[in-house]
Amino acid sequence: MKDEKVFAMEFGRVYKALVAKAEKKGRTRAEVDAATSWLTGYTPEQIAAAEADGTAYGDFFRQEPEPNPHRDKVTGVVCGVRVEEVEDLTMREIRRLDKLVDELAKGKPLDTVLRA
């Protein structure tokens, strides 16, 4: 039930919060876009379009054009939840993006965040 609320939220509202979190720690929107692109396969232009058109947060992840085959390397705890143990695949992707943004906000270099 809780997941359904998250899935129904507007992507644009959530994404703005993620960008603000990163910017508050001296990072840029371009870096958040790069992390999101790495994870999902969306281009920065597609991310901006989804942000503007009211796409649901769950749909953004369910419709990923090219999920990164190395996304399973995003592990650890975010919001008290171990990312790799989340059973719902859509929620796992949401947690992965949260984790990437958390790592940016903690000052990790972008190439490390992107598992380069």
Image: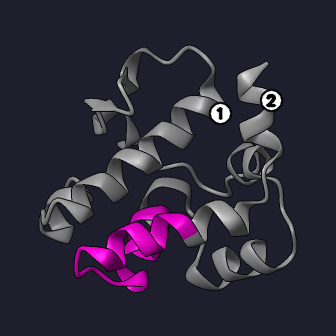
Q: Where is residue 47 in the image (x, y as percent from the top left)?
A: 65, 74
Describe residue 76's horizontal placement relative to residue 81 as left or right. Answer: left
Disc 2 marks which residue?
Answer: 4
Under circle 1, the secondary element is helix
Which of the 4 quarters of the picture holds residue 107?
A: bottom left
- Mark 2: amino acid: Glu
Q: Which residue lies furthest to the front in this view?
A: 24
Which of the 4 quarters of the picture holds residue 73?
A: top left
Q: Is residue 19 above or below residue 4?
A: below
Magenta residue span: 17-37
**Residue 55 on the magenta span:** no
Q: In which quarter of the image is the C terminus?
A: bottom left
Q: In this view, does 44 lie above or below 8?
A: below
* Figure coloring: one colour
Disc 1 marks which residue?
Answer: 90
Describe residue 88's horizontal placement relative to residue 57 as left or right. Answer: left
Residue plotted at (54% across, 66% down): 17
Front-lying residue, 5 or 83? 5
- Mark 1: amino acid: Thr
How many residues crowd mark 2 within 10 Å: few (<14), some (14–19), many (20+)? few
